[in-house]
Amino acid sequence: MTGVSWKQGVSVALVGLMVLLSGCQGESDAAADAQAQRPDRSSQTPSVDVAVAEAGQLDEGAEYTGTTGPVREVAVRPRIEGQLLDLRVDAGDAVQQGQILGRIDDNLLMTEVLQAEAELAARQSEVAQAMTQVQSAQTQVEEVRFQLEQARSDADRFQSLLNDGAISAQEAEQARTTANTLLQTLRAAQNQVGTQQQAVSAAQRRVEAQRAVIAQIQERRSFAVLQSPISGVVSARTIEMGNLVQTGDEVLTIGDFSQVKVTVQVSELEFGQIQVGQSVQVRLDAYRNQTFNGTISRIPPVADPTARLIPLEVTMPNPDGRVGSGLLARVRFQQNGSNRVVVPQTALQRPGEARQGRPDGQSGRRPGSNAEAPSRSEGADAPPRLFVIAEGEPPTVEARPVTVGEQADGQVEIIAGLSPGERYVVRSTRPLEDQETVQLSILSN
């Protein structure tokens, strides 16, 4: 190759290199312009979900299952036998205390009443006869008393004549004998009056006894009318009209559903942690989205000797009567300890988390902020923080150190640092900083 050709080649290569460098510079400037035009996400206001701090319990306790039933249930049983002539209610009907439910044939009892009344009339006739005899005896007593007074007067007069010598001693003695005889007759008549009066009393007692018999039969007749002993709902009807019922046969079952009772079997290991009057929460599979409040109404002193279980009774109000019998109930005993604020673990932020996830490596503070770099106390040993919504507009957050307690199922107890009623950040679109302005999401409380 000649010298001229070699120089020309070098010149061409230099020109190409310069063109290549110019193209690279242009691409670099274009990239810088695009980066400058791209919005800085760190300067955007973060959106946060806010919740209200509430006191609660981290450990909800064990759940026990039972079956619902009326707080009180009675069976309507006849107290006499006979044919069931009428039955006015059926299962599901509401009844009131004292309401007539049905009637049993009472013709036989009516016949007994008529016989007893006839016997009473005979006893009353005996009383009347005895009283007549008493009156006769009393009349005889009065007659004998009059005769006795006359005889005594004659005896005194004859004694005076005897003293004067006008009559003999025999005549005077005869007058005294007549008076003494009338005295004995008077005493006998008086005794007869007492005997007749006793006969009247006996007859009157027989009358009263017969009246008691009639009252007893009438009371048995009243049992022919079946009445509701309580207010409630008919839960079962076991006998139909026309059947013969015996004394004690169950005709109807009535339940009082003003309250609902649930019996649950509790282990003896839990016995020391429960007491009568303690609050419980009841959930029914029939009403999945609702929780009912109840109380422990009875703790029997005897446990099942085989299973070592204690059948507790829990009652809960049922004012509208919609909770019936036989529903599956899930009972959870509320702990007696003091409630603390419980928040999701995701609401806690450890110191230093605010610097994670930033694409530019900046601190995440707002432009122009005077915040300083974290001190050593904000290291791994520093307490966790919650971001609490401060008062005022626009809303800002306050980074507040908190003391945490037990943790379970994604929840954590806040022992100190947050009070019930305060609003705190549950989650945000990016890590937050103290005193930073935020935007509340539509999910916030």
Image: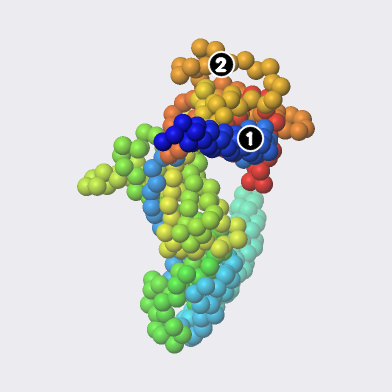
Q: Position of residue 76 (x, y in %)?
A: 46, 70
Q: Is residue 112 above or below residue 306?
A: below
Q: Amino acid at mark 1?
A: Asp
Mark 1 or 2, which is nearer the eye?
1
**With 164 as the anchor, is 184 left or right in this view?**
left
Q: Is residue 187 above or below residue 277?
A: below
Q: Is residue 428 visible?
A: no
- Residue at the (57%, 69%) spot, across then down: 95
Dot 1: element: helix
Total marks shown come to: 2
Instruction: Check disc 1: other Cα within 10 Å, few if <14, some if 14-19, many if 20+.
Output: few
Asked whether 84 or 426 is in front, the reply is: 426
The answer to which of marks 1 and 2 sits earlier in the sequence is 1
Asked whether 221 or 247 is in front, the reply is: 247
Q: Is residue 101 visible?
A: yes
Dot 2: element: loop
Task: Find the residue positioned furthest to the left.
Answer: 306
Instruction: Check disc 2: other Cα within 10 Å, few if <14, some if 14-19, many if 20+.
Output: few
Locate the C terminus by quadrant.
top right
Q: Position of residue 429 (x, y in %)?
A: 59, 39
Reading the image, the residue beneath label 2 is: 374
Q: Amino acid at mark 2?
A: Pro
Tell me the quarter of the picture where residue 38 sits. top right
Reading the image, the residue beneath label 1 is: 29
